[in-house]
Amino acid sequence: MTGPASGRLALAHVSKLRAYTPGIQPTEPGWVKLNTNECPYPPSPRVVEAVRRELGADGAALRLYPDPRSAPLRAAVARMHGLEPANVCIGNGSDDILNLLVRCFCGPEAAAALTLPGYSLYPVLVGIQDGTTRAVPLDRAMRLPVDAITASGARVFFLTSPNAPTGVGFPNADIARILGGFGGIVVVDEAYAAFARENAVGLLAGHPNLVVVRTLSKAYALAGIRVGYALAGADVIEVIDKVRDSYNVSRLSQAAALAALGDPDYYRGVVDRIRATRDCYSGRWAEKRGWFTFPSETNFICTEPRDSVGRTGPCVARSAYDFLFSRKVLVRHFPSDALTASCLRITVGSEDEMLVLDDTLDAWLKAPPNA
Ligand SMILES: *Cc1c(COP(=O)(O)O)cnc(C)c1O
């Protein structure tokens, strides 16, 4: 069956889906790319060695399927967090883990609660499952509406902490209150935990309904290798494993991830450098420019540009975005969410990239308004 009409055979809820919009990945050189929160520095040299070793002289190992459970990687992740391998599931990126969680815990009768704003992939995944979402709005103070969440009646609650796209971290005390009062699974998506003050891993011991999700895409500089993981009670991991693709993580990815986890000193240096750059620029925009800037515990900064005549708003943010784009500086603008519509989300790049960005913002301010 081919031809233009075949798509109509898709299930009704699938036909209505709107796909996730990833940040632009330009293929030509010359861009300052600050739009998808990738790491500006390369991964540990041990990663490159490990991938070469896995590949061997002739790539013969690629004939063979990878370890279906990524067992050595589960063991390494468990050791790193002081848990057991039975508490770990490895995903083809943390997006894979989030997808598995939606498959297991969401559907037409099992709603998913989420905050607005939050990681915009969750509602897309819930839509694929024909599930229902209950959105809980956040305001500029970014305090978790604990009571609204526990009263949501949802089967699962997805929390991006620190939050994306604002960068604000939520206190463990609030997460613990949700864990105690919410009848479903609480997924704490900690993609940016390496840059944060607190994380929820310590809450796993007392809370069987907690799932912590991590990725190697941001702090470990491995977005291209696609590895993430879930930490949870053994019974939740067993459920996820039933739904998981048997060979979901490639040989090269498993080797790369193991090597990365084996070089914590290198990554401490990378994270310290990114945090220092972040604090320098978020301070500068808040104080020198007088721009409202969310306090970031991530590798990005969410700031509200103020134009040369002192205006803010979605159009001002768009104008700054467009100006930056015209100078080949890529950032992110999320116009559909009220809290972030007047802001830009800017990945913390290298010192050189941030200089270019800051100079280009100066040029935007000097350009005629509405230009
Ligand atoms: C980047 C990001 C992810 C995706 O991570 P991958 O491991 O690359 O799939 C998940 N959640 C949040 C909040 C992110 O920012």
Image (cartoon, helix red, strand yellow):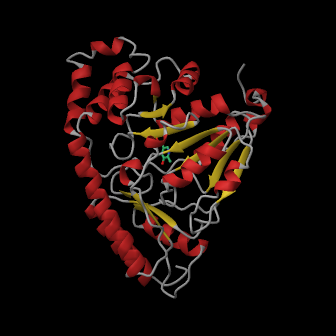
The residue positioned 78% from the left and 34% from the top of the image is 109
Is 127 displayed left or right of 270 in the figure? right
Count of labels in the image:
0
Residue sitting at x 23%, y 27%: 50
- Front residue of 345 and 232: 232
Residue appearing at x 72%, y 45% in the figure: 133
Question: Where's residue 309, x and y in %?
Answer: 51, 88
Position of the N terminus, as image quadrant, is top right
Q: Determine whether 40 is above or below 333 in the image.
A: above
Q: Nearer the viewer, residue 314 or 229?
A: 229
Query: Residue visible at 73% across and 49% down?
Result: 151
Q: Residue 255's spot in the image, x, y percent?
A: 30, 26
Residue 265 in view of the camera: yes
Compared with 258, 1 (above or below) is above
Q: Going by the image, does 240 lie left or right of 261?
A: right
Residue 257 located left or right of residue 308:
left
**In the picture shown, does residue 24 fall above or below 104?**
below
Where on the picture, by quarter, is residue 56?
top left
Q: Give the farthest residue toward the bottom.
A: 309
Q: Is residue 353 visible?
A: no
Q: Position of residue 20 (x, y in %)?
A: 60, 44
* Most foreground residue, 216 or 321: 216
Using the image as rendered, state which of residue 89 and residue 31 is in the foreground. 89
